[in-house]
Image (spheres, rainbow, N blue to C red):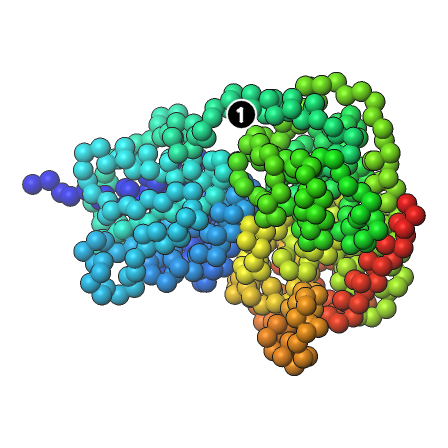
Amino acid sequence: MSTPRDATTAFARTLVDEWVRAGVTDAVIAPGSRSTPIVLALANEPRLRLHVFIDERSAAAFALGIGKVSGRPAVLCCTSGTAAALFHGAVLEAFYARVPMIVCTADRPPELQNVGASQTINQIGLYGDAVRGEFNSLPPEDLPNAPEEWRALGARVAALATGSPAGPVHLNLAFREPLVPTGAPLVPAPGRPDGKPWQLAEMVTEMSTEMSTGDLDSLARTAATQLAAADLTKGLLVLGTGARISPPTLARFLAETGVVAMADPLSNLRTTQSVISTYDALLRGDEFASSVTPSFIIQVGGPLTSKATNSWRARVASTGIPVWSIDPDGIWSDPDHVITERVSADPEIFFTAVLDARGFDSFDSSWSDRWQRADEQARIAIDTFCDTAAETSPPFEGRLARDVLAAVPDGTTFFVASSMPVRDLDSFSAPRAGVRVLANRGVSGIDGFVSTVLGGARAAGPVVALLGDLCFLHDSNGLLGAATRDLNVTLVVVDNNGGGIFSFLPQATVLDPATFETLFTTPVGVDIAALAEVHGLTATVVTEVGALVPTINAAIAAGGVRVVVVRTDPTTNVDRHREVWAAVAAAVKNS
């Protein structure tokens, strides 16, 4: 009678080898027992970097950060039960932000399901429709053709995670005991001799779109011909999160058409003075907003961060002008329901096709000239206010956002948290090249942000992040062990003792102060610097805004994970925002 071969260990190692062949470089695990086979396979793979987190939420957000920065999926692994449920927040963000991720949840075998076994829940469909694919693997067995099936599964998971659109793929792995290698010979499962994945991405049917690349090119050119024939005299280009167009192509399009471009910092196209950066302040003024009605709007990527600008766009769109959306993955991104034409094509192909479809004649520059003049005047008003009227203590949060982005060295990855930091960055930051700007805006939560930043730094450092105190506290578990992870991260924490964004909402004026504070601003009274020091991190408290930039530069130069705390006042902050909006309206009154 032959000795049974070890199928469990062979299966786990085969999956891991396929993922490495597909370009995976990092694995993030939250320790547990049932996941032992896959965890040991990940740990024994010398081509992988392994990251261990106690808290599953922090582990998942760390993997999210790796995928967001590198474009490669990290393998995220945990045991069964509630551990798997704690991945859900990061899975949602990865899905809606199109970030690749391979999510491995260990599970009990079928005979332990629905019989009251410990740490056992129904993990099939755990993440709902927020995954690009889901696979439920039965306990591995030494059966004919099993090795080929294992190889195909590993390749398929990686291909789906990095496909169009990219996103999380859930692999639910049922394991029987023994969970450790038995010492018996492994089931042989050799991969392709050339080191390539078992299946290339284009061979996996779930990866293919409804049209081939050639068809997409044709569609782009057909739509581009229509656009080239349209009246672009007063065209407006809206560049939101994920706007995938190269700066040279954008510059050529603007120069040859006279179209005006609004660039959100998260588009990573707010890099030159040729794009409008002060639209949030400009369009809060009724007089200016009512005088600049475009004839055509093209949206690339998601909507802008600015609520005021999106509301203005919805108003002008209601007049019946064409509003186009260009997205390579064919994702619907139209919360205001104003899009009249949706083109599923690579923006680079599309805009090149527009320019090639028609040689643009000279155009009347009065439209673009007016926007450029107003942008320059608004920038002067914003900077003057930030540099003078907002010089007094406590620091002005708008100036903090402007100054932090302006100060970081070229080559830095800059993360900005949801809530007020990303809004202030949009409202106040000037064009800046040489820095990549990222945020968790798939579902715009503040949870897991610290760990996302740390994961991003694992993929590419140094990293500087701007976040609020509640965001910092939401993921303080992510700081566990951060001092030992060999990362260069500077966390700039705006400490206004609560949810400062709520001070801008109607609730702040219609509720009595005590009720508003209890239900919305939720002051916690935590010493952020002391909390950072508990985790072995160096923390510096900045009280004067002029000391902020030198402190950040010193933190980056020193390396490691460091925290810079800037204490502000939410009430004063609201007043200053309104003052700067008024200053901009006055500056462009006669433009």
Residue shown at 68%/79% (left/top)? Answer: 513
Q: Which residue is mark 1?
A: 216
Q: Is residue 287 visible?
A: yes
Q: Is residue 4 above or below residue 475?
A: above
In the image, what residue occupies the spot 53% across and 25% down?
Answer: 216
Q: Position of residue 443 (x, y in %)?
A: 54, 53
Residue positioned most to the front: 319
* Picture quadrant of residue 157: top left
User: Horizontal and vertical percent for residue 428?
Assistant: 77, 53
Outermost residue to the bottom: 514
Residue 334 appears at what percent x and percent y?
A: 59, 44
Instruction: Decide if residue 490 is in sight here.
Output: no
Q: Would you identify the image quadrant in which residue 351 lies?
A: top right
Position of the N terminus by quadrant: top left
- The amino acid type found where label 1 is placed reads Leu
Q: Quadrant of residue 508?
A: bottom right
Lateral position of residue 551 relative to residue 417, left or right: right
Residue at (74%, 47%) from the top-left corner? 409
Q: Secondary structure at mark 1?
A: helix
**Residue at 27% of width from left, 32% of height from top?**
148
Q: Is residue 461 above or below residue 579?
A: above
In which quadrant will I find the C terminus? top right
Left or right: residue 176 compared with residue 61: left
